[in-house]
Amino acid sequence: MVFILLEDINITSGSAQFHRNFMDVYLSQQSRSYLSMLIEYQKTLKQRNSLLKKIRADYKSADIGHLDIWDDKYLELSLDLMRARRGYIESLAPRVSELSRHLSSNLESAKIKYSPRLMIPDGASRPQALEVLRSHRQADIKTGVTHFGPHRDLIDIFVNHQPLRPYGSMGQKKTAMIAMKLAALEKLSESRNESAILILDEAFAQLDNNRSQALLSLLSGYGQVFLASAAEPPVDGKAAKFEISNGAIKGRS
């Protein structure tokens, strides 16, 4: 199931936390192993941060060797998560560009790129990767938190080669967000070998008429689609319409 909600505009205009949520939600729906890996990573990050705080509080008597153990596990999980996220975003990127062009009548092309926050050179060996992690150790101990890793990842988003978050209009941001969500829907349907359900809430808000019509033309190509709107949505007679008032269905047409 894929939702497109009003607050999803944060994916293209808000903090990086929304980027990570986007990747984690849909990767977890596609892969139970990713979900298990993510849960284990979060536990390991919590344990490492707890140890960092203890070391900061009593550095002279702290056993740094314990941190070496947690670093090994943390790095292994980080590399697995980063590999999965990079592959996922790379698989979505071409379709996001196509969908954004369709929605904008070929005026805009959105590009997305995975941007990890543990900068390990391509082809680096495990000892080299561990060295990168440990190069930040003193800063981690000083603050009692892990500064670099998948919990700080983001997605770089560009429209017509310009960074979207600082320079894009609200319409451009919503268009790019919808393109990302629809690409995720298609990938989820493909991976599960069944049509994922699409649920949209006020999908046409902040979209002009041309973009709204372009979105409607795409929706007919998906499986089950639920569209909620306070105003009459511009859909044709093929769709079943329900009027809801005070939590109760008043009628259907």
Image: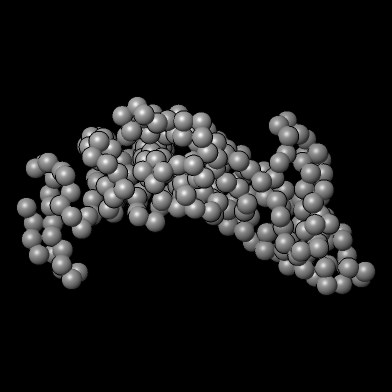
Q: In which quarter of the image is residue 51?
A: bottom right
User: Residue 135: percent from the left, percent from the top?
Assistant: 82, 48
Is residue 114 in view from this perspective?
A: yes
- Please identify the residue farthest to the right as the structure is shown: 60
Foreground residue, 140 or 1?
140
Front-most of residues 148 and 66: 148
Q: In this view, does 68 lie above or below 180?
A: below
Q: Where is residue 105 in the image (x, y as percent from the top left)?
A: 31, 29
Figure coloring = one colour
Q: Is residue 35 visible?
A: no
Point 93% across, 69% down: residue: 60
Query: Residue 52 appears in which quarter of the rendering?
Result: bottom right
234 sits left or right of 86 in the view: left
Q: In the image, is residue 220 above or below residue 246? A: above
Task: Report the front residue among 76 and 144.
Answer: 144
Q: Which residue does the image show at 82% across and 40% down from the upper left?
A: 127
On screen, residue 62 versus residue 166, left or right, reads right
In the image: residue 118, left or right of residue 154: right
**Taking 100 as reference, is 55 left or right?**
right
- Please tell me which residue is depicted at 41% across the width and 43% down the height of the picture: 169
Q: Position of residue 94 (x, y in %)?
A: 45, 29
Which residue is drawn at the image coordinates 88% and 65% (left, top)? 63
Number of numbered tags placed on the structure image: 0
Q: Where is residue 27 in the image (x, y as percent from the top left)?
A: 49, 46
